[in-house]
Structure formats: structure tokens, C-alpha cells
Amino acid sequence: MKNILILLTALITSNSYAQFDQLKKAVSKPIGDVKNIISPKKDSLSTNDVISGLKETLNKGIEKGTSQLSAIDGFFKDAAIKILMPPEAVKVEESLRKVGMGNQVDAAILNMNRAAEDACKTASPIFITAIKNMSFTDAWGILKGGDKAATNYLQKQTITELTNSFKPVIEQALNKIDATKYWNTLFSNYNRFSFNKVNPDLTAYVTEKALSGIFYQLALEEQKIRKDPAAQTTDLLKKVFGGK
């Protein structure tokens, strides 16, 4: 999400504290009455500018973030979000590699990541709907929130729908190679003798990791933009961010 926080940084830091206080007071007013809340100048920002600019920024960030993760190796070659065997199964993995099954383990890990990449292709429309439904109150919460405010908003609004969307895609991808059957058999038996249980539902495990990965990526981009605002890419964003 390359541009998520340019708006946040600009609105909070580019104007005086008096102007920022004026923005805070505007929250209690009806949306229709909130005009020129940043400054009294003729070309000052309206409430609609703020909301439209924030939505535009989020849309651009979502488009970039989801396309990056849904590409080949979007998960597999990103060490921060790559899906590996669960920590509880490390000993099982080590044992399999010792008996010459390293290639099978590597193939399983690759397929889990490919399944997550496929699932991310379904995320963009869900995020876009959440952005379209964002109210002024939602926008203000993001503007005054912390460095993960936008990500937290999207996660809260979309987690259930994303889970429902990701799960069948991941299940289909894993079933193509009978991964779920072997996983269930292996770890159901393993769990009978181990105190550190492994989730025998491979689809659920990969779905959970895929969702963690996508929100990790969104939060990472959001934090970058809060610390290092990028160039505005449209006239609206230039107006919102105070650019020339």
C-alpha cells in the first residue's frame, strides 16, 4: 500500500496546530455543514476532499498490495510472509528430510504458498467495497489513528468475507495435489503422541497464514508512507496533500 498514509501525514503535519484543532472540532458537526475545515482560504480542503482523497489513496494502495502478493512468488519469495511448516511440526519436517523426503516437504511448502497467492487474487474487490462504504467517522478515525489505522480498519471490515473468499480457493489448490489428505493423516497421527498439537486442517492453516500475510503487507506499506510521504499522483491528492 504505497500511498496509504500520505494523506494522514499531510493533514496532521503540513498545517498549524490551530488548523488541526479546527479539524477536530469539525467532527462534531453534520457532514453537510463541515466546509473548509482545514483553512478559510478559497482553495482549502472540504470534507469531501478529505474523504475522497483518503479513498483514492487506499484504492491505489490496495491495488498495488494485492497485485504484488497475488503474483507468482508473492508469498514464496518474501521471507517475512512465506508460509512454512508450523513451528509445532519442525521435528516432523526434520525427520522427513532425514529419510530422504526433503523434496516432498519443499513441494508441500511451495504449494501452500502458491495457494495463498491464488487466494489473494480475490481480495481486491472485497477491500474496494469496504473503502466505498467508509463513512466520515471511519475516515476521521483513520486520520487521527496510529500507524496501522487504515490497515486495522480494513481488517475489521473485511476479515470474515476474506476468510470465506480465500478458503475455497486454497482448498481447491491444495486438493489438486492431495495435500490436504496427506496432511490430515500425518498430523492427526502425530497429534496422538505429541503435546504440541498441529492443526490437522491444512486449508484452515494456509488460509490463516495468507490473511496474516496480506495484512502484514498492508501495514508495512502504511507505516512506510507515514514516515516517508511519496509524491502525489493526481490533482485531488495534490490538493489534499498541499502539493503544488
Image: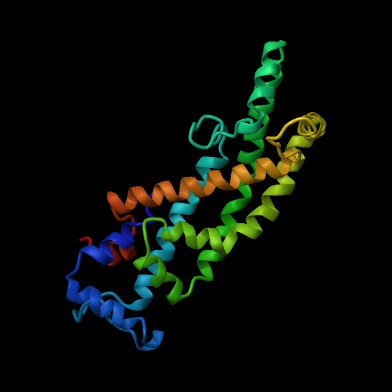
Q: Is residue 99 above or below residue 210?
A: above
Q: Based on the displayed image, in which of its 4 quarters is residue 244 positioned?
A: bottom left
Indicate how the structure is coloured in the image: rainbow
- Depth check: give the residue in front, 216 or 225: 216
- Count of number-bearing discs: 0
User: Where is residue 208 drawn, in percent x and y?
Assistant: 63, 46
Q: List x then y, in percent, for residue 169.
A: 71, 45
Write the residue at 28% across / 62% down: 238
Q: From the viewer's perspective, is 191 left or right of 73?
A: right
- Answer with left or right where residue 73 lies relative to residue 176: left
Name the residue: 34% across, 67% down. Answer: 144
Along the line of sight, which residue is nearer the eye, 217 or 190?
A: 190
Question: Which quarter of the picture shows residue 156?
Answer: bottom right
> In the picture shown, does residue 84 fall above or below 162?
above
Residue 230 visible somewhere in the drawing = no
Q: Position of residue 75 (x, y in %)?
A: 55, 35
Task: Tell me which residue sits at (44%, 53%) in the image.
Answer: 61
| Residue 163 visible to the viewer | yes
Which of the two residues, 205 or 159, is positioned nearer the viewer here? 205
Q: Position of residue 86 (x, y in %)?
A: 63, 33
Residue at point 17% right, 70% down?
A: 16
